[in-house]
Amino acid sequence: VTELPEEEMPLYYGAAQALLLPSRYEGFGLPALEAMAAGCPVVAANASALPKVTGEAALLVPPDDLAAWSQAVLRLLRDDRLREALVEKGRERASRYTWDACATRTLAVYRRVLEKSSSRG
């Protein structure tokens, strides 16, 4: 498998009809967020971190249910309103996940741990 250059990924996501992400063990769901930020609707497994990351901005299906995947993809390709709604919701959802927000939350966790540590000692 050839890896695509990271800087070109928004072009591929933007040109795609959808991102299909049948992952059972997704650590965070970055591909889903990248696709949503680029205006690509997402069909993802309702497993691991994906439901929490995508919220209502993606169609979620069981990872091993081929019939459900087929139905979700066909629905997405045939229903322009659904597709447009998912693109809009996806962009809004992806905009919540910024590196600044991540750094702020991480710093808050470190501060809480340090406060608890110093109050015990």
Image (cartoon, rainbow, N blue to C red):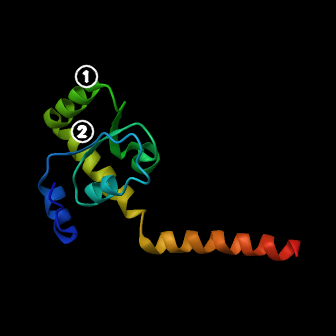
Q: Secondary structure at mark 2?
A: helix
Q: Is residue 74 above or below residue 116?
A: above
Residue at 38 percent across and 55 percent down: it is 93
Q: Which residue is mark 2?
A: 82
Quarter of the image holding residue 14?
Answer: bottom left
Q: Check disc 2 and give the amino acid type.
A: Leu
Give the image location of residue 65, x and y in percent: 31, 25
Residue at 21 percent across and 39 percent down: it is 81
| CA distance separating discs 1 and 2 | 19 Å
- Tell me the mark number nearer the camera, choosing from 1 and 2: 1
Disc 2 crowd, CA 10 A, few/some/many (<14, 14-19, 20+): some
Pick the front one: 77 or 85? 77
Quadrant location, the N terminus: bottom left
Which numbered circle lies on residue 45? none
- 92 to the left or right of 69: right
Quarter of the image holding residue 38?
Answer: bottom left
Quadrant location, the C terminus: bottom right
Q: Secondary structure at mark 1?
A: helix
Pick the front one: 91 or 16? 16
- 113 to the left or right of 6: right
- 64 to the left or right of 115: left
Q: Which residue is mark 1?
A: 67
Residue at 21 percent across and 42 percent down: it is 83
**Direction left: furthest residue:** 15
Labels 1 and 2: the sequence-earlier one: 1
Q: Check disc 1 and give the amino acid type.
A: Ala
